Image (cartoon, rainbow, N blue to C red):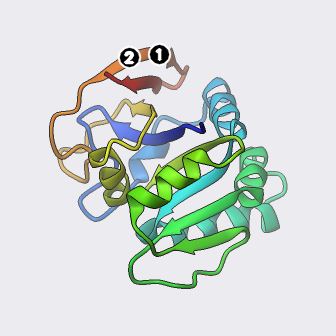
């Protein structure tokens, strides 16, 4: 059975975005080659990306623009993986969103995820957004949590945990730029 892997950036005070979805703090620590390679490995272990509707347009535009117009960008290997990967946006309001290898799922979240996990293939990767990820967590659908802890506090914002969730630390990889990639499993 395929695993559902969550990868998200998080501040040290537990937020995944500012109050209005801002993520300008993600880049404050600067680039890190080891960390970037680990992120590519995680993406390469998957063949499907799940996205919440609210973040889909910006996510698709960012990565497709990088592939099409920034061939020398250091994130080009990750961009190629993401653009070429099958992507599913979950939405109750949209039926058609344009993007390469993108489909829209309007059905029941739990039923759809359980069916995806049973399909053959590599694992499934989730990048966000916050509300969508919260729903996945609330329904115990996440099998592995890859949380990149950023050395910054923002004081308020969006969180993915609405109640207590006990996790088990599987591994921790510090990056030279001060970020730490923590892999957690449900306890």
Residue 89 screen position, x and y as percent: 52, 67
Q: Secondary structure at mark 1?
A: strand
Instruction: Tell me, yes or no, whether the two marked residues, 2 and 1, touch with CB atoms within 8 Å.
Output: yes
60 relative position to 178: left or right: right
User: Real-space Cα distance between discs 2 and 1?
Assistant: 8 Å
What residue is shown at x 65% (from left), y 52% (from top)? Answer: 48
Residue 59 appears anywhere in the view? no
Q: Residue furthest right?
A: 71
Pointer 2: what residue? 169
Q: Which residue is mark 1?
A: 172
Q: Residues within 10 Å of mark 1 (few under 14, many from 20)?
A: some
Quadrant assignment for the C terminus: top left
Q: Position of residue 145 (x, y in %)?
A: 43, 33
SS of the residue under disc 2:
strand
Seen in the picture, residue 18 relative to 16 is either above or below; the reply is below
Q: Which labelled disc corresponds to residue 95?
A: none
Residue depicted at x 43% and y 59%:
111
């Amino acid at each position: 059975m395929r695993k559902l892997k969550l990868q998200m950036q998080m501040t040290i005070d537990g937020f995944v975005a500012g109050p209005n979805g801002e993520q300008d703090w993600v880049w404050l620590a600067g680039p890190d080659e080891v960390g970037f390679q680990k992120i590519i490995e995680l993406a390469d272990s998957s063949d499907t990306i799940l996205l919440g509707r609210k973040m889909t347009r910006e996510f698709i535009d960012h990565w497709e623009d990088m592939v099409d117009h920034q061939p020398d960008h250091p994130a080009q290997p990750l961009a190629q993986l993401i653009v070429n990967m099958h992507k599913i946006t979950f939405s109750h309001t949209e039926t058609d969103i344009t993007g390469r290898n993108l489909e829209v799922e309007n059905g029941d979240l739990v039923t759809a995820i359980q069916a995806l996990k049973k399909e053959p293939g590599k694992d499934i990767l989730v990048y966000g957004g916050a509300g969508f990820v919260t729903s996945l967590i609330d329904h115990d659908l996440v099998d592995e949590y890859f949380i990149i802890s950023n050395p910054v506090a923002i004081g308020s914002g969006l969180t993915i945990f609405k109640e207590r969730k006990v996790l088990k630390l599987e591994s921790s990889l510090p990056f030279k730029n001060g970020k730490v990639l923590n892999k957690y499993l449900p306890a």
